[in-house]
Image (spheres, coloured by chain):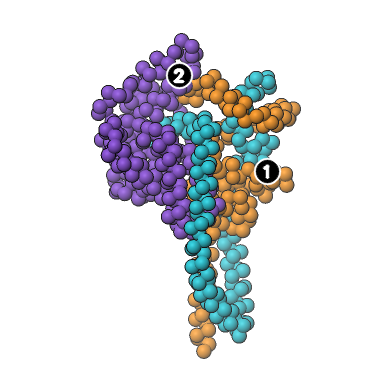
Chain colours: A purple, B orange, C cyan
Amino acid sequence: MATAEELSAFLAQVERRAFKQTAYAVRDDHVAMDIVQDAMLKLAEKYAKQPASEYPMLFQRILQNTMRDYWRRQKVRNLWTTLLSSFGGGEDEGDERDPLETLQSDDDQYQPQAQLESRQTIAIIEQAIKTLPTRQREAFMMRYWEELDVAETAKAMGCSQGSVKTHCSRAVHALAKIMESQGFNKQELGKFGGER
Amino acid sequence: MVTKNLLLILVLCSLFSGFANGAAIKDTHPSWSHLTEQQRKVLSPLASEWDTLRPWQREKMLDIARDYPKMNAEQQQRVQRRLNKWSRMTPYERENARKKYQEIKQLPPEKKAALKQKWQEYENLPEEQRDQLRQSHVDAHPAQKPAQ
Amino acid sequence: MNQEHDTAKQIIHLLNDNLASMDANTTHKLAQARQRAVSAHALSMQSLTSRQSLTGLQQGGVLRLLGGYFHHHPAFLAVLLSGLVLLTVLAVQQFSGATNEQDIEQSDGFLLASDLPPEAYVDQGFDQWLQKTSY
């Protein structure tokens, strides 16, 4: 049984990533905030009995389910949400502008080139993540950002461990391709230090 | 009667030896209940979140507990005060902190003292100003890390 | 597989970098949401603790039984305790022996014990401050 301190410590650790992850999925910061707040409350109220070691997996599952609830409600009201469907990525990009194009049109004569580049990098990566098919993005976020192991990810996603691995490798492959096509080669991404 | 008591002793002893064996097996990421009392004393600020830490995070914290006895009282107090903040940083931030720390370790004592002074100045600035400084750093140092 | 892992790590590294510059408004809202969740947790725990006191009584009963046994057979208690002490000593020896190889490498402990708190090492605003005030 997790204590209030454990819950608080856990949420403090994951909240920023949870917000970002959700924002990539729903593409709206206000909605993302609502979903994350909702998910936190659900974890606190419905899973108080669970040990804290289950929290990483549980919270991810709650987040996914809350997002799906939101989409289901939205689909009824809003045609535009077809862009957010699980089969997205390439389809009907009419409303989506090329990220480079968008950035360059932002009165770039007043911004130093350096400033433009740093915002470009993260914008391109975030855009790439947003265009991933839902299951690939979920698996990628959970395995690599939340650092859940394959079994936990499978539990959170409600699929087999084999599927998790497939979704992950497809996600990484797709992201690498997008990065390369936007001019990032292996040298650009560089060698980052990491704890693992 | 004697055999019954002997049996009881044997059962209880084997239970305890089983426990000891379990502790002896090298467990690099034990749960809170499996830590020694000394480890729990050092890592007490992390008691509430210990079981949510990933295995490698626990390993690193146990390394800190291992070095703790080598420190003086002031150092030990600092470690205890700062453990929570440390555990909540992202792996990326901790890695950067290590690199910075190695650089700063090499500085002569007067530079180190100056740095400490500067940090206190910085902490006394209003949060708004500190946010502004952070943003100006992002703007001034684009995609710097990939090049390194 | 290794390639996939490396590429993923590079991307995550950049995502984490971006987290560091999240605006104060968002981080504040997240902190508030967290506090609300913790309050809600406290409320739901209240209903659970009343159920727990029952099982506590049952556990106390078992201990009392054991205690009664040792009271009447003190010799066995002595044997048990000395055996336990011996085993604990052995276990501690094995535990401390296993970490000897790692002594050479320093832990993050010394970083945490240093003059600066850990957040100082990663605060980019502090970097800027140092440059501005010419260090």
- What residue would you read off at disc 1? B78
Mark 1 residue element: helix
- What residue would you read off at disc 2? A117
Percent x, y of residue C73:
60, 84
Percent x, y of residue A12:
52, 43
Residues tagged 1 and 2 counted as in contact (Cβ below 8 A):
no
Percent x, y of residue A65:
35, 46
B139 to B59, vertically: above or below: above
Give the Cα separation between the discs numbered 1 and 2.
Answer: 39 Å
| Amino acid type, residue under disc 1 in the picture | Arg
C83 to C70, vertically: above or below: above
Q: Which sits in the foreground, B15 or C9?
A: C9
On the question of residue A30 being in view, the answer is yes
Which residue is painted at 41% across and 41% down in the image? A35
Which residue is painted at 63% across and 77% down in the image? C78
Which residue is painted at 40% across and 18% down in the image? A103
**Residue farthest to the right, as pictured:** B110
Q: Chain of mark 1?
A: B
